[in-house]
Structure formats: C-alpha cells, structure tokens
Image (cartoon, grey):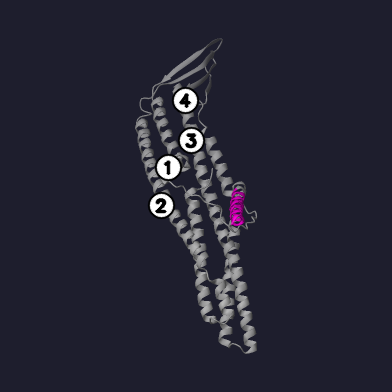
Amino acid sequence: MNKLIIGILFLSVAAQSSYESVLQQIETNNTTLAALRQQTDAHKIGNRTGLLPDNPEVEFSHLWGIENRMDFSVTQTFDFPTVYKHRSRIAALQNEGAEQSYKAQRIEVLLLAKQTCIELVYYNILAKEYDMRLKNAQLVANAYKTKLDKGETNILEYNKAQLNLTSVQVEAAQIETQRTDLLAQLKRLNGGKEITFLAESYPANTLPSNFEEWYATAESKNPELQFVRKQIEIDMQQIKLSRAMGLPKFSAGYTSEISGDESSHGIAVGLSIPLWENKNRVSEARAQARAAESALKDSQVQFYNRLQSQYLKAVSLQQNALKFRQSLTENGNESLLKKALDAGEISLLDYLREIEYYYDTMNKVLEMERDFEIAAAEFLGIPR
C-alpha cells in the first residue's frame, strides 16, 4: 500500500512538472504573447507621450520700407501646474491597466495550453488502455483461428473475433490521430517548436473547501477586474484633470525689435482664460466615471456567478469520477470474463457483450476524470 501511495504521488508530481514545463516553454515561445507584449509596451510608451508642455513658438519677421525692420520672439505656453500632475497620474494608471490587460490575455493563451495538456493526458491514458485491449483482442482472434483450423468452432464465431479485433484497431488508430492533432496544437502554441508530452496521469488538484473565502482572494487578483478598477481610477483622475484644465494657461517669452539703427528687447507674458474650450469636460468625465463603476459592478457579478458555476461543476465531476472509479475497481470483471471464455463457460458473443460493457464503463470514467481536470483548470486558472 505504501508503495502504491508513493507511486501515485510520484506520478502526480511528474504530471505537474510536465504541465509547468510546457507552460513555461509556451510563455517563452508563443508568438501571440510576444506580439501582445510588444503592443503593450508600445501602448505604455504612448501613454507617456504628451505629458510635457507644448512646443515653444518662434517667430521672425523682416519688413522692407523706409527702414528695414526685423522682429524676433520666442514664447512658451504652460498649463496650470496641477494639469501635468494629473496627466502623469493618468498615464501611470493607463500603464498599469495595460499590464492587467496583457495578464488577462496571457491567462487565455496559457489556459488553452493547459487544456490541451489535459486532453493529451487523457489520450495518452486511452492509448495505453487500448494497447491492452488490442493485445486482448489479438489473443482472442488468434485463439479462434486455431479453433477454426482444428474444427472446434465455426466460421461465424471466427468472424466475430476478427471483427472485434478490427474494431479495436480502428479505435486505437483514431486515438493516435487525436494525439497527433493535440501535439500539433501544442507546437503551434509553442511558436512552431516541437514539444514532447508523454504524461499519463493528472497532477493532484485540490478544490477549496469554502468557495466564499477562496473567492475573496480570487476577486482581488483577477486581472480583468483589476483592469476595470484602474479604469475607474483613471476616470476619477480625468475629473480632476478637467477641472485643472479650466484654470488659466500662462505664456512667457522673449521678444526683440530692430528697426534701422534702433533696437529694443524685452520679455512677454500672457494669460489665457479658457472660457469655452473646456465646457462640459467635467460633466463628461463624471459620466465616464459612473459608467466605469457600473461596468465594474457588472463584471463582479458576472465573475462571481461564472466562478461559482465552475466550482459547483468541478466538485460534482470530482465526486462522480471518484465514485465511478471506485466502483469500477471493485466490480471490474475483465480478467474473470477472459478466464470464463477460455474455459468455455461463456460463448464468444456473451464475452464480447460483457467486455464491451466493461470498456464503455472504463471510457466513461476516463472522460469524467478528464472533464473534472478541465473544469478545475478553468476554475483555478493559471498562476501569475
């Protein structure tokens, strides 16, 4: 029993290690993530653009007449100082939001990769199972060929054994096709680089015993919700910025005038009062903030309901899979059926009918275990 427990733990650790290895490779090599990373970095640079004062204005004029005259001036316009503070804060929040958006898309890519790994584990297990079924079908077919040659059975029984063998061979070939397709999908996710994945067991998945306590932590870490929260912060800062933009702008500069032998130099200052330019900007910013708050509430409701549904589904699948597996282990008759057939206690037709029932049950158990793993992956997500 101790050896069995150690063996199961080893397989779970090995499967977990295989998952992590594949996900690490894909995160490094995935072309979609690489493009998203570059787009995010570009957006972050764009968010920091336009934070400095406007460009200075330089004017020069040369007039001809009784006396030549040349005018020259340099002027710099400034917003009210708090404008730059709020713009800088908005840019920082936009960059944080861009990172949260990237993390959400990263999770989508890696979750697809993990689901593909789970499907591969399922088909690897199924391939191993069908390898045993194929050997068994081959033994039965060979035995009935020998019986037919000795005149101990008829052609109808022999044909049943051959058809059974062919059916298992076709199903085994279909499984290999599925495995090939899944490995090709992993290769695509890995930027076209080959990935070897031979795991034949799932890593241990522990569902939280209390959903509400687990959810409180999950909600605070969800990148989609964090993105919406950042948008609310941005909109609140936008209100402050709109108010600040309603304050006067300043300009300062140097000016000179040369006319004949005379010249004059001095400074120039100006004040721009935005009476109409920023009308309704504060109202617009407030409306945007209210819309963002509504979007956050909606996202929280949708996120909670989605996770709760996934949790209940995963718990149900786990319980049913464990119950089904235990029943199959305690009540499986595969070896007994083969002994009864070899001893002539049951007919070939009875054997094929009973073994098909056992195989169907085994397939359902494997499907249920796979479905639980997929549901658990969707519920627990991908570590950041």
The residue at which mark 4 appears reads as: 85
**The disc label shown at residue 309, or none:** 2
Q: What amino acid is labelled 3 in the image?
A: Gln
At x 57%, y 68%, the residue is 174
Q: What amino acid is labelled 1 in the image?
A: Glu
Sequence order check: which comes first, mark 1 or mark 4? 4
Q: What amino acid is labelled 2 in the image?
A: Ser
Q: CA distance from mark 2 to mark 1?
A: 16 Å
Q: Position of residue 259 (x, y in %)?
A: 53, 13
Sequence order check: which comes first, mark 4 or mark 2? 4
Q: Helix, strand or loop at disc 3?
A: helix
Q: Is residue 17 within the magenta segment?
A: yes
- Furthest-top residue in this view: 262
Q: CA distance from mark 4 to mark 2?
A: 44 Å
How busy is the neighbourhood of tag 3: few (under 14 within 10 Å), some, or many (20 plus)? many
The residue at which mark 1 appears reads as: 213
